[in-house]
Image (tube, helix red, strand yellow):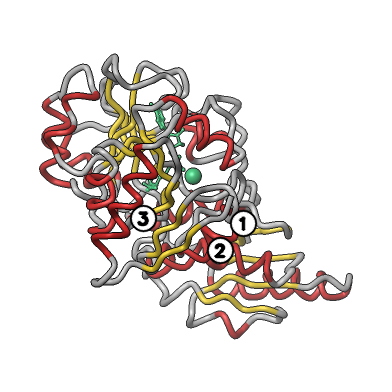
Amino acid sequence: MVTKVIAISKENRAAVLREAGEIMKAGGLVAFPTETVYGLGGDALNPASAKKIYEAKGRPSDNPLIVHIAAMEALPAIVEEVPETAKRLASLFWPGPLTMILKKAERVPKETTGGLDTVAVRMPVHDVALDFIQAAGGYVAAPSANRSGRPSPTTAAYVAEDMEGRIEMILDGGQATLGLESTIVDLTVEPPMLLRPGFVTEEMLSVALGEVAVDETLLCGDSGQAPKAPGMKYRHYAPKGELVIVRGSEAAVTAAINERLLAGRAENKKTGVIATDETVERYEADVHFGMGEKGSAKAAAERLYRILRECDDEGVELILSEYFDDEGVGAAVMNRLRKAAGYHIIDV
Ligand code: TXA
Ligand code: MG
């Protein structure tokens, strides 16, 4: 299959979205930009499309997909009911980086929900995403557009790296501005439960809903429990090299990271370091990755997946990372970074 990669412009936009919509209605796959990461879209109401998505991603088919909608009016048709909690969250955070788990309606195929009776729904805020969803018939099932086990793609070029030859079309809408996947909250349980941290933070959900529980498996990899969002159980985002996070006072972290980098060099390993812009040049690494200014979780979120891909591109074998601010949006950054490190954190 030849994958068409098309940069959306003012001139071609209407025609390209029409073509993308036709591909989707015929059961094909189109990758599209959202504000979080690029999605790999198929018709959510067509079981055959869901199967193709799993194949293209190399993802196990028990991992449910998020259904993307472009208007609140589209919601009632795919869920058993729209609870008050969902209305409240939608009015506050949709369109935007929030996914809600609700009881699914009959017409959503089990292929889309990985066999579950619930469905994940999100209304993205990216204007190309919204127009694409409309053109595709209103219901787009889309996981992140990476091959399983790779970091989620934040540019069309990264999508092409993973999906060239596997899907019909890639819509290039520029860089994903947020850079991390949506927050997921399960509204089918009482109290509602946060399954994946993101830009809509736990604090923001608590203000809107009152008590919010947090899936315990988010914090460590070896709790022995299955995470509530099936996709969270897979080894994700791991660079090919060994990644270790070091936490402690600034001076202790600098010393500990440099000690390990020098030991890696002594073993002829190519080394890398992930640190704030202020501190990154202090380290004795072959490759330096700046995560943005200290305390800026947004900058860190935007850069993290690019940095993890670059570690592989540069062939870095040992990567040391500082521990970043884990409040607010930082909780999402550290959730992804911890997973990438296989939960290998050293306290100094
Ligand atoms: O920002 C995002 O959410 C991006 C963009 C493309 O919208 N999408 C995304 O999809 O991150 P994906 O497939 O990579 O992650 C979806 C997560 C998985 O961990 C999956 O297990 C969980 O959502 N999920 C989906 N449906 C679920 C359900 N019914 N119950 C529990 N978890 C569910
Ligand atoms: Mg994903």
Q: Amino acid at mark 3?
A: Thr
The answer to which of 277 and 31 lies nearer the viewer is 31
Q: Which residue is mark 2?
A: 248
Q: Is residue 230 above or below residue 309?
A: above
Circle nearer the viewer, 3 or 2: 3
Q: Earlier in the sequence, mark 2 or mark 1?
A: 2
The yes-or-no answer for disc 3 within 8 Å of ligand 1 is yes
Pointer 1 and pointer 3: residues touching (CB < 8 Å)? no
Q: Residues within 10 Å of mark 2 (few under 14, many from 20)?
A: some
Residue 336: percent from the left, percent from the top? 50, 51
Viewed as shown, does residue 15 lie left or right of 37? left
* Residue placed most toward the observer, 65 or 101: 65
Judged left or right of residue 7, residue 1 is right
Label 3 sits on a secondary structure element that is loop
| Total numbered labels | 3
Point out the tag, 3 or 2, that comes first from the N-terminus: 3
Q: Which mark is residue 347?
A: 1
Residues tagged 2 and 1 counted as in contact (Cβ below 8 A): yes
Q: Residue at x 60, y 69 (%)?
A: 253
Q: CA distance from mark 3 to mark 2?
A: 30 Å
Label 1 near ligand 1 (CB < 8 Å): no
Residue 279 on image: x %, y % = 53, 80
The amino acid pointed to by label 1 is Asp
Q: Are marks 3 and 2 in contact (CB under 8 Å)?
A: no
Q: Residue furthest bottom?
A: 281
Give me the residue at 54% from left, 73% from top.
Answer: 275
Real-space Cα separation, disc 2 to disc 1, in angstroms: 6 Å
Q: Residue at x 50, y 53 (%)?
A: 152
User: Residue 36: which numbered mark, if any?
Assistant: 3
| Among the two numbered marks 1 and 3 on one chain, the one whose residue lies closer to the N terminus | 3
Residue at image point 60% right, 26% down: 224
